[in-house]
Amino acid sequence: MTYSNDTRRADLAKIHLAKKQLGMTDDVYRDMLWTIARVRSAADLDEHGRRAVIEHLKKCGARFTHKRRIRPAGNKAGLIAKVQAFLAEAKRPDSYADGMAQHMFQVERIEWCTTEQLGKIIAALMYDAKRHGRRTR
């Protein structure tokens, strides 16, 4: 079985997320990589090495959650759908919108934003789309 580049990037993201979750220093992290797969950088891991490292990190207590679906309140559903459309066009995860809500309004999740706040997030995403030459409608 051969992994696609997207799968490789997802595996590397899991490894780096687990490193952060477990509070590993760079030295401890590189020593773990060397012990498990005989590499000093996750970029050098082959697919077998990535699987082995991810399994080891799970045993150490790292948690990997599945992608969640956003379920907005009725009157915000259209606005959230528009946010998701902009994110899909930009090839960004749904969690990017949560980060925007946190940064802009100190609201942890986009579902908790008011309709006014959602409008401002949409405006920011429209500005970003125009700046990067993507569609805005």
Image (cartoon, rainbow, N blue to C red):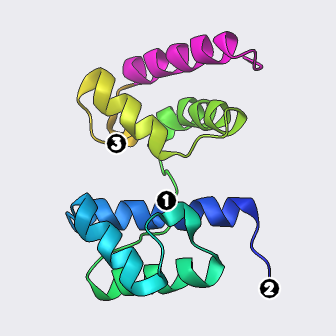
Disc 3 marks which amino acid? Arg
Q: CA distance from mark 1 to mark 3?
A: 21 Å
The crowd level at tag 3 (other Cα within 10 Å; few <14, some 14-19, many 20+) is some
Between 75 and 15, the residue placed more toward the observer is: 15
Q: CA distance from mark 3 to mark 2?
A: 37 Å
Question: Which corner quadrant of the image does residue 101 belong to?
Answer: top left
What residue is shown with label 1?
13
| Quadrant where the image shows the N terminus | bottom right
Residue 9 visible? The answer is: yes
Disc sitting over residue 1 in the figure: 2
Horizontal arrangement in the rendering, residue 114 relative to residue 74 (left or right): left
Q: Main secondary structure of the magenta part?
A: helix
Q: Secondary structure at mark 3?
A: loop
In magenta stretch: residue 127: yes
Q: Which residues are magenta?
A: 115-137
Above or below 126: residue 42: below
